[in-house]
Amino acid sequence: MSPLFGDGMVLQRNKPITIWGWADRGEKVTVKFQKQTRTAIANKDGKWRVILNSEPEGGPYQMTIKGKDQLLLSDVLLGEVWLCSGQSNMEFAVRSANNASREILEANNTQIRQFKVPNTISKQPQDGLTGGSWRPATPENVGEFTAVGYFYAKELYKQLKVPIGLINSTWGGTDIETWISRPALENSDIFRSMANVLPPAADLDVVIKARKEQLLATIEKLQSGLPKDTAEISKWREPKFDDTKWPEMPVPAFWEGTVDGLDGTVWLRRTFNISKKNAGKLAELHLGMVDDEDVSYLNGVKVGGMKEGYNTQRVYPITAGLLKEGANTIAIRVQDNGGGGGVTGKPDDIQLLVGEDTIGLAGQWKFQVASLSQATNNNADPNVFPSLLYNGMISPLVDHSVKGVLWYQGENNAQRAVQYRTALPLLINDWRKSWKQPDMPFYIIQISSWKASGGDSRLGSQWAELREAQTMASKLPNTGLVVTVDVGETNDIHPKDKQDVGKRSAALSLARSYGMALPYQGPSYKSMQIKNGKAMLTFSDAEDGLWVKDKYGYIKGFELAGANERFYYAKATLDGNKVILENPNVSVPVAVRYAWADDAGDANLYNKAGFPLVPFRTDDWKTVTANMKYTIK
């Protein structure tokens, strides 16, 4: 059986139920569920499939599958099944969210369950998964749930009172193109020329081998290759080890800026001085966030380490007597399993607190690559080729009925934001075709605020253009948009407030997919009128009035520009459900922008229901990502 079919599984209610698996060629397989019995014969490839009639919500039930042997699946539920997919902000686990300890402790709903699809790439579309199992939302399990998905499911369960199944198919740091099927790319106007020159899937190994050889050549140039002596590596934690010939990289930063494509184990070292007055004192070592795992040493003594939590701050206590006067050495063994790697965060996160002093540790650190990860050795880079994740992590799911999709991805595509206007609708239609559900609900979670490259209206903002592309895609039938610019974090691409994201997603779903009469979206730009040097804006979904999230009533996030296309922050005032904008530097306004920046977290206009205004611009002036196109790496 596919791992999707196991104890504790959740099946979609009120839709035909497809069950499949493998047996010997010609083997007769019988499936019994509720009062239904279906029989199939395994084909020449050993695959068999039956389709059961739809069933209402309920459970727990049992299902039997009998061929030459027999399987008994227990604790089967029928309810609502949602696919949660995208990159790291959807992958982001409950254990890293705000108030994680309380959320985990209070999780006690076995009617909410998650199936985590293993990270898998494939050259060809697959029928089966490499593993996975259904887990209920209990304190033992919920920490590993997708946080957005879990908080979404909690809200759905409150209203629907039916089992909720989450299929978590995510991989951090991934491009949208790897999630789209090859036939869809080949039939797309903007991707057709690229798809037509792709080598056959069988030649993918050649492409990946070349990338690995390039990585090894970089390592050879930096440090004369990978170390062959494990005994030598064991000395790298020691303070007396001579690292003067090691290369350097900036900390905090993802190390791909120094060694592109690196997934594996790297040692980082930094030597600093301690004064006589602070020698021997208790201290606190702050090492920012480590992607993915660390073991950290001070003067050769292990002071901390975490196996999980790529977005969790590392703060380790230093015992009395460990710090010595003069030179001291920090050594960190960092293991990255895929995507970005290294010690990340902001410079103020990298420091030592001792006595009344703060010793900054950000800057250039010595480093040495110890080994490449199994993923690298197995050529498991999901972005090396289009369609790899569709083949390995979506194709095996398409016969399993779902209610709809929550999609949270885009950070990786910000540099190609204009092209995303085509890529995201292409993915939506591709998946709907794959599931044979042309109206399958598809809800887009807009990327949040983050400093990124500091883009804004004057410099150009890739992230604002990506959000615009997401807004455009949400105009497709049976789609919707969840705005999150106000819950981002300037210095963290992975904001921890996933509760609000889940709740807003649930409100959208309950209203649009389940027909409940409740508010579910924020205001959006409708029209602009220019009069006496001022711009008057009207909005949809603001009939009950607008609300400013500021105790003094200051509206932030609006900008004005004249014909010279130079933007200035606008003074904004409310007039009922309208907004009046002005700036003395713009005598004749021509264009307005709102929340148009990489980090747009100061935007603070909502409707009375508490949903934020959708970021927008009224102009169609030149974009900074217009000429950026997807290419095979």
Image (cartoon, rainbow, N blue to C red):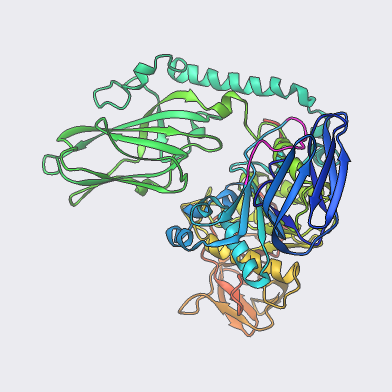
Q: Residue at x 71, y 53 (%)?
A: 62
What is the quadrant of residue 267 in the picture?
top left
Please provide the residue range marked out in magenta: 123-133
Please check the rendered image and state whether residue 131 is part of the magenta-colored stretch, yes or no: yes
What percent of the width, then of the height, locates residue 369?
44, 24
What percent of the width, then of the height, locates residue 41?
88, 37
Magenta segment's dominant SS is: loop
Q: How many marks?
A: 0
Residue 337 seen in the figure: yes
Give the vertical position of 11 relative to 197 (above or below).
Answer: below
Please check the rendered image and state whether residue 494 is part of the magenta-colored stretch, yes or no: no
- Looking at the image, the residue that sits furthest to the left is 277
Between 49 and 460, the residue placed more toward the observer is 49
Quadrant containing the C terminus in the rendered view: top right
What percent of the width, then of the height, locates residue 34?
79, 57
Quadrant containing the N terminus in the rendered view: top right
What percent of the width, then of the height, locates residue 58?
71, 63
Residue 457 seen in the figure: no
Q: Residue at x 55, y 22 (%)?
A: 215
Between 212 and 68, the residue placed more toward the observer is 68
Left or right: 134 with respect to 239?
right
Give the vertical position of 546 relative to 132 (above or below).
Answer: below
Between 291 and 210, the residue placed more toward the observer is 291
Between 51 and 224, the residue placed more toward the observer is 51
- Looking at the image, the residue that sits furthest to the front is 69
Give the vertical position of 91 relative to 201 (above or below).
Answer: below
What is the quadrant of residue 607 in the picture?
bottom right
What is the quadrant of residue 524 in the picture?
bottom right
